[in-house]
Amino acid sequence: MPAEMTRDGWISAHPYLHPLADVDALVGRATAGTPVPAVALPAWDAYAADYFAGVPLLHSAKAAIDLTEPQRAVEALIKTLSSSSAAGPIGEQCRALAAELPIDDPSQSPHFGLFRYLLWAVLARSLDPVVRAFDAWRNEERWLHNYCPTCGEPPAMAQLIGTDPGRMRKLSCGCCRTRWQYRRTGCPFCDGEDQQRLTAVTVEGEGGLRIDYCESCSGYLKTYDGEGHEHLMLADWTSLHLDFVARDRGLKRLAASLYDLGG
Ligand SMILES: [Zn+2]
Ligand SMILES: [Zn+2]
């Protein structure tokens, strides 16, 4: 494995990612230090009709996945982070968020972005066994939607896998970390309209990452053309510099993101 494909190697090659890497590591440590509530697997047969109708797993009353416990666990995580010695804006924001507990309506919080990021840090861990079982159960050809089959969010990124004739594209969820199959070409943001092809911008020395954009809607999707380093290359924050490259070209981030690019 080339050195630049490890987390440390990648960050030292992209030093401006240090602040994000620190936040990711801090939240990762705090999440690992709090209990992960288990989420029971759904009865797949009961959910099947909803799946064929395009209803994401977490939105299905038939699947009835109970997220009460992980949602409660995010409050424990906020408390852990606020009592840690975390400095800088993240520490301050965690302490401000902790002062709001219990939070009845997170969308009204001035720190909703941070809340959502922390919520998904907990949910992604709790849902990991569900996401794996769902991967094994579902028939990808029966989905092919432009939103996540697990949580319903738009994709954060995409991945190109394999070689022709079996080459395919997967979309990647930045929230629950599901990856699902989508049309090989075509813009996921103009979904259902004409089959707009995407134009690829490759960036030298970026480990197979490129920017695929649509001339019709100006939306772009960061795409990892490779396999084996999904954890690093599809993490979204590890390629935030490509969002700035895209923005400088006048492209719009229509993909979902847990990271605010700021002004
Ligand atoms: Zn998802
Ligand atoms: Zn488009």
Image (tube, rainbow, N blue to C red):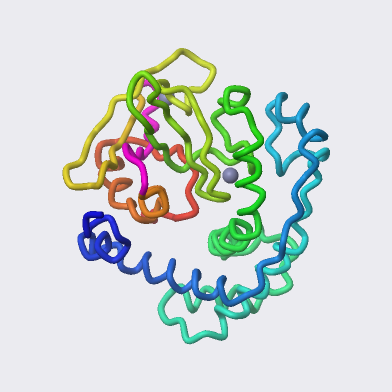
The N terminus lies in quadrant = bottom left
Of residue 214 and residue 223, the one placed in the foreground of this image is 223
Foreground of the two, 202 or 159? 159
Q: In this view, does 107 lie above or below 139?
A: below
Residue lying at 63% horizontally and 63% vertically, measured from the top left: 109
Residue 53, given in percent of the width and then of the height, sits at 72, 24
Q: Nearer the viewer, residue 102 or 155?
A: 155
Left or right of residue 241: residue 76: right
Q: Residue at x 71, y 30 (%)?
A: 51
Residue 27 on image: x %, y %: 50, 70
**Relative horizontal placement of residue 149, taking residue 180 as reference (left or right):** right
Q: Residue at x 56, y 71 (%)?
A: 31
Instruction: For the C terminus, give its image quadrant.
Output: bottom left
Q: The magenta stretch spans which residues?
A: 216-228
Q: Pinpoint residue 181: horizontal percent, then vertical percent.
A: 51, 30
**Residue, far top:** 194
Q: In this view, does 104 lie above or below 216?
A: below
| Residue that appears at 33% across and 35% down | 251
